[in-house]
Amino acid sequence: MAKDKIDIKAVQAAVAEAPDASWDATENRITRLPEEQRRVRLGVPVPDQPVRESLERAAAAVRSAHASGPQAAARAKAESASLPTVFDLRNVGGQSYVAGVRDQGSCGSCVSFGSVAVLEGTARFGRKTPSLAVDLSEAHLFYGHGSTVGVTCDTGWMPMPALTFCTSKGITYESDFPYVAGNPGGKTAPTGWEWHRGRATGTVDLTEKVADIKKHLTTVGPVTGCFVVYTDFYGYSSGVYKHVTGGEEGGHCVAIVGYDDTKQAWIIKNSWGTGWGMGGYAYIGYGQCLIDTWANVGVTGVRLRTWTTPKKVLGGYASGSERSGWVHVQDHGWVSVGGLTGTAHVAMFADLLTAKEKGAFVNAYENEGVIAQTYAY
């Protein structure tokens, strides 16, 4: 056995013997790594003992509220009375609002991936446009903004300050600042990146609020989740994870993209590539390892600055009030029509509706929810 490689057979045996464990483990490229290289793929500083104890108490309360038994079941049901039993942003009416699974590589940048997943999912879900082309730069958030406050691959980060940068400054697109683990060469965002970016409208702290996390998922978008990783988690392959065996490895951040009350679990999107877990996803039990009691942060909305690329106008709307025109752009959703003056607004709106009638393509520049410039083809 390679030095420090995880003994998957021992993990499998421990899970099989645990009376309330219902998950499977298998060897993967993470379990084959030496311990030091595995831990680099985490990236959330574990809190000091007094804070840790408080988080553990909160997690125990969550587990108790969702334990088996009529009283606990009634209590959990009352908390989520107005919510669906199962909700998954990867399948809302047959549509997925979640971007593909990514790989943070050998760097403690998980917070950046969890935070960007929150922005991208919220942008798509908010517009009810699963095909929205919004691929934002984890590198810009971590190696750009994060570096200004001392963040490195070794220090890791936390979701609230990361998403605060996403709110105050925004982040550019992946095409402008591609992610490479460790950012060799010290790449930076290009000049003028502010005109090609995604920016959150605000943050919301949902920590220790299970029902509020579920409501946010069903109405706004994904939420970050930080949790303690134990050695057995690296080998997770399916089922509902709960810690069974192995020591504490460190803190990690993921995006929570759904929940399933029938399984008593959150659905999480990890950043270790598609070869880990269920194609990069996992179920983690409610109250397990601090997943719902430590740094659960969402955003209130996302505004974009980007060209749509050539698309068709699918619909138009106006209330009759001055400068109230909206258009629905293919694969982009509803966007308000701009114009520096009322006359310019009417002219732009008319051009877009003409393009709709003719089936022509338009390339529109959106400036945070408002079309500021268009070309018709």
Image (cartoon, helix red, strand yellow):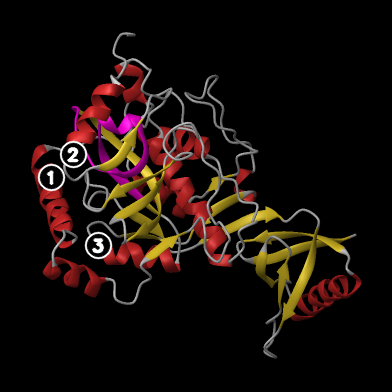
Q: Is residue 245 magenta?
A: yes
Question: Do residues under tags 3 and 1 come within 8 Å of each other at their CB atoms?
Answer: no
Q: Position of residue 33 (x, y in %)?
A: 37, 17
Q: Is residue 292 left or right of residue 113?
A: left
Residue picked out by circle 3: 209
Q: Amino acid at mark 3?
A: Lys
* Residue stretch in magenta: 224-247
Residue picked out by circle 1: 51
Q: Position of residue 172 (x, y in %)?
A: 58, 44
Residue picked out by circle 2: 47
Q: Position of residue 179 (x, y in %)?
A: 55, 32
Picture layout, residue 15 above or below residue 86: above
Q: CA distance from mark 2 to mark 1?
A: 6 Å
Q: CA distance from mark 3 to mark 1?
A: 17 Å
> What is the quadrant of the C terminus in the image?
bottom right
Picture layout, residue 271 above or below residue 216: above
Instruction: Characterize the local packing of mark 1: few (<14), some (14-19) or many (20 or more) Cα atoms within 10 angstroms.
Output: few
Q: Position of residue 268 (x, y in %)?
A: 39, 47
- Sequence-wise first label, 2 or 3: 2
The residue lying at 14 percent from left, 66 percent from top is 72
